[in-house]
Image: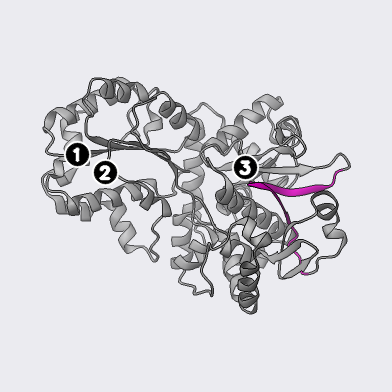
């Protein structure tokens, strides 16, 4: 690599600031059939000497987000050479990373604050050594860095090895999630009544204002349900939504590209295709059912629960899964040795397993053809869990062991799908059906006295238990991330 030439090629705005308009990511965004501004974009303030990390699964839009930030900087920046971007897909040594950064820093004496964007930094082993060296030698003075990566583990560990060097600001670690249900609906051009994201779980359980709002919205349930059935098939990844709006379904090309992206991420860590796919297949087969690591191993072809745990956690650290552990409410502690529940981070990953096995093409216009009632129920519980995770988890950077969301089951096999910590623990059960009987509420009433039940189309309040249709629950739930 001839470093200076490559730096100039990656940063054409150094000679022509308007060249950013020709960036392929921004052109794709401009021509996209929908416009989506991730909520975390407004949480990244570039006006200080900070080191941000931006994480998320492959194809979720991290590069597009930072290119948008660069475009905004160029519109307000007099000296375009103070803005530096570099993709690290082909950089596999921290010494080369150091050379790239020093070459840039020496090329242009700073005219003001500098902005450095390093894409997929987790490809570089021990990348933090290069950043630490430059910070300690004062070569990154008055510089804001944004570092992206697809691995929660590697980028987190690297950031943790920069104590006192990331700036006097909290919440410097950001996660870019797929579009939520409400973002999917809005981006699809569907107008639904009520303001999305108004209420926390506690407000859903206790607030009279929430109950009044949801009763006023209930007559429009069919419209919400129609969007939800599409979301179950398409999911929230921008590439899948683009396909849906342009083609009416998720294309084979998108499935293949995403499968390749997943395998590329795992192969980077020396993991086998067969074991990775076997793990995903077993998780799909057991979705909503508590699993032990030994059961996961037996169902995925892996020898030994420890290895199965390693694969599942690595998939979670790549933001493809999240793992809920059993909570002992009396001790307010999780019990990792008991059965845990594993969910997908997005419906597309669930469907990817079927697509890989059956080569089937999914059509969101006719989801009943492809989704049985059992599959719908599984995916609804999965979506509810993912949205609760984004609502209550104070540190969403650790999807392999959430600290504010758990599962629960008794010694007799009775279970509650989710226990969410929002001040106190709130019990949430998914019953995606059109009739909720007293026996459906028995475990929640006897064990937790009150809670939320997510139904298909039932809206009812029974002695401290509120039953809410899934689409309305997802629309009104306030998200942190």
Give left or right: position of 53 versus 376: left
Q: In percent of the image, x 69 and y 32: which residue is there? A: 301
Q: In the image, residue 386 lies at what x, y percent? A: 60, 50
* Disc 1 to disc 2: CB gap under 8 Å: yes
Q: Residues within 10 Å of mark 1 (few under 14, many from 20)?
A: some
User: Which residue is the site of mark 1?
Assistant: 113
Label 1 vs label 2: CA separation? 8 Å
Residue 47: assigned label: 2
Asked if 32 appears above or below 50 in the picture, the reply is below
- The answer to which of 356 and 261 lies nearer the viewer is 261
Q: In percent of the image, x 48 and y 62: which residue is there? A: 183
Residue 441: assigned label: none
Q: Mark 1: which secondary structure?
A: loop
User: Which residue is the site of mark 3?
Assistant: 404
Q: Indicate which disc, 3 or 1, sits on the residue closer to the N terminus.
A: 1
Residue 459 figure quarter: bottom right
Answer yes or no: is residue 362 visible.
no
Q: In the image, residue 467 lies at what x, y percent? A: 73, 65
Q: Mark 2: which secondary structure?
A: loop
Label 2 vs label 3: CA separation? 32 Å
């Amino acid at each position: 690599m001839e470093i200076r030439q490559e730096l100039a090629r990656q940063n054409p705005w150094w000679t022509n600031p308007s060249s950013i308009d020709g960036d392929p990511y921004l052109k794709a965004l401009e021509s996209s059939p929908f416009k989506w501004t991730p909520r975390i974009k407004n949480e990244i303030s570039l006006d200080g000497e900070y080191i941000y990390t931006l994480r998320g699964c492959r194809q979720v839009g991290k590069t597009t987000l930072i290119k948008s930030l660069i475009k905004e900087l160029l519109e307000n920046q007099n000296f375009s050479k103070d803005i530096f971007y570099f993709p690290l897909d082909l950089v596999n040594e921290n010494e080369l990373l150091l050379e790239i950064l020093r070459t840039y820093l020496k090329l242009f004496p700073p005219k003001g604050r500098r902005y450095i964007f390093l894409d997929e930094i987790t490809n570089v082993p021990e990348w933090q050594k290069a950043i630490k060296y430059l910070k300690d030698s004062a070569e990154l003075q008055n510089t804001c860095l944004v570092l992206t990566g697809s691995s929660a583990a590697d980028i987190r560990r690297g950031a943790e090895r920069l104590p006192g060097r990331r700036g006097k600001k909290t919440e410097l670690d950001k996660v870019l999630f797929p579009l939520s249900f409400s973002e999917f609906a809005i981006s699809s051009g569907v107008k639904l009544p009520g303001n999305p994201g108004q209420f926390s779980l506690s407000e859903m359980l206790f607030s009279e204002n929430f109950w009044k709002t949801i009763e006023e919205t209930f007559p429009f349930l069919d419209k919400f349900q129609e969007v939800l059935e599409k979301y179950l098939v398409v999911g929230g990844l921008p590439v899948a939504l683009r396909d849906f709006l342009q083609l009416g379904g998720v294309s084979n090309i998108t499935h293949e590209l995403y499968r390749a992206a997943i395998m590329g991420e795992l192969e980077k860590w020396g993991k086998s295709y067969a074991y990775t796919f076997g793990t995903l297949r077993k998780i799909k087969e057991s979705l909503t059912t508590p699993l032990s690591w030994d059961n996961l191993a037996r169902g995925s072809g892996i020898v030994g629960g420890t290895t199965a745990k390693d694969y599942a956690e690595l998939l979670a650290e790549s933001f493809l899964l999240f793992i809920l552990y059993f909570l002992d409410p009396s001790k307010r502690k999780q019990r990792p040795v008991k059965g845990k529940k594993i969910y997908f981070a997005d419906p597309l990953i669930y469907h990817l397993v079927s697509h890989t096995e059956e080569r089937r093409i999914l059509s969101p216009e006719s989801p009943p053809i492809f989704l049985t009632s059992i599959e719908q129920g599984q995916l609804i519980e999965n979506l509810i869990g993912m949205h609760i995770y984004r609502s209550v988890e104070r540190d969403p950077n650790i999807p392999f062991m959430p600290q504010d969301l758990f599962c629960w089951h008794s010694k007799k096999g009775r279970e509650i799908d989710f226990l969410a910590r929002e001040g106190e623990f709130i019990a949430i059960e998914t019953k995606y059906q059109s009739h909720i009987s007293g026996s459906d509420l028995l475990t929640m009433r006897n064990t937790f006295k009150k809670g939320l039940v997510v139904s298909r189309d039932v809206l009812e309040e029974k002695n401290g238990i509120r039953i809410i249709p899934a689409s309305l629950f997802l629309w009104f739930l306030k998200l942190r991330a």
